[in-house]
Amino acid sequence: TVLIIGANGQIGTALLPLLQDQFGTDNVIASDLQKPDHATGPFEVLDATNPDALTDLVRRHKVTQIYHLAAVLSAKGESDPLWAWDLNMKALLNVLEVSRLQQLRKVFVPSSIAVFGDDALRNNTPQNSVLKPSTVYGISKVAAENWLAYYHKRYGLDVRSLRYPGVISYQSMPGGGTTDYAVAIFHEAIQGHAFDCFLAEDTRLPMIYMDDALRATMELMNAPEDSISVRTSYNLAGMSFTPAELTAAIQRYLPELTVNYKPDFRQAIAESWPMSIDDSVARRDWGWQPGFDLSRMTEEMINQLSVVYQPA
Ligand code: VAH
């Protein structure tokens, strides 16, 4: 049985049906702080920071794998750093400790390009860069990566991880990230609204389409254990673009889109992050190949969201 923690979030929402396909609907337990309006399979209310609740859930459902997708993201974390640190670390250590004690077979914990900071190269950022993050979210991810490697080395826990770029998807809205603009712009564009962009037009960031992010996750989790050479977290790349380039790509379908640039505190966060990522280690170890570039992603987002926003 597989447990998803943070199943209502951006990645959890899209990952759930894939795991249901692979393992069977009854063998995937979705969990989050609140029950969603329409659960598509077994659902449990869970506070990931509560050890007793997590242990109980894992035992009751005979869970053998966890996908831990609950975290406070970069922009939101800056509004209350100690709260974000506390929540992200408590939930992570709870998941790792329960996984060790209950002898789980595999665990997935995402990291992020937010681990990189001012001392890393910003172009084709290598796997083994100096990690000096600028946000409390990034600090918690660097710490998390080191805890993953520690649990693997000391206890043999098979925990795997990817440094996701900004993830773009139509299934649900991201919450509290610095890359969120690249999802929000599609929703406004489709509805014919002007878009206020909180990053400057030339701010290049690494991004990935959800299909690619999920395929990378499944490929990593299904790879033979001895092919995994990175036990902190793998660099992962999809595409890289600026708000101006994304706007132009959307305007090919929706020419009336107008964008006003109003950079706020998130601009400094974005400028501390890479512009593009070297993911050659993931390509070598488990054969990673991205499938979506800017134009294919844009076409797909517009097709999918046109259905969502279709007038009744
Ligand atoms: C954020 N989307 O903006 C997240 C992410 C690539 C960064 O981890 O905080």
Image (cartoon, rainbow, N blue to C red):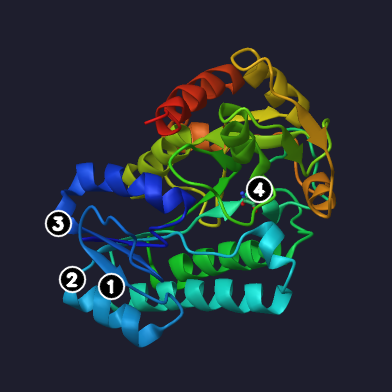
Mark earlier in primary sequence (4, 2): 2
User: Is the CB of the residue bearing disc 4 within 8 angstroms of ligand 1?
Assistant: yes
Q: CA distance from mark 3 to mark 4?
A: 34 Å
Residue 311 x, y percent position in the rendering: 42, 29
- Whether the residue carrying mark 3 lies under 8 Å from ligand 1 is answered with no
Residue 26 shown left or right of residue 116 in the figure: left
Distance (Cα) linking label 1 and label 4: 30 Å
> What residue is drawn where x is 79% and y is 41%?
199
Tell me if residue 2 comes above or below residue 251 in the rendering: below
Mark 1 or 2, which is nearer the eye? 2
Can the viewer see residue 237? no
Quickly name the residue at label 1. 103
As displayed, is residue 307 above or below residue 10?
A: above
Report x, y in % for residue 134.
Answer: 79, 59
Is residue 225 depicted above or below 149 in this figure?
A: above
Q: Few, some or many C-alpha atoms within 10 Å of disc 3 (few <14, some 14-19, many ≥20)? A: few
Closer-to-camera residue (176/85): 176
The residue to which callout 4 is attached is 113
Crowding at mark 2 (Cα within 10 Å: few <14, some 14-19, many 20+): some
Mark 2 or mark 3, which has the lower sequence index? 3
Location of residue 251 by image quarter: top right
- What is the secondary structure assignment of the residue under circle 1? loop
Q: Are marks 1 and 2 in contact (CB under 8 Å)?
A: no
Q: Which structural element holds mark 2?
A: loop
Q: Earlier in the sequence, mark 3 or mark 1?
A: 3
The N terminus is located in which quarter?
Answer: bottom left
> Label 3: which residue?
26
Which residue is labeled 2 in the image? 61
Type of amino acid under label 1: Gln
Where in the figure is residue 242, as x and y percent of width and height?
75, 30
At mark 3, the secondary structure is helix
Q: Secondary structure at mark 4?
A: helix
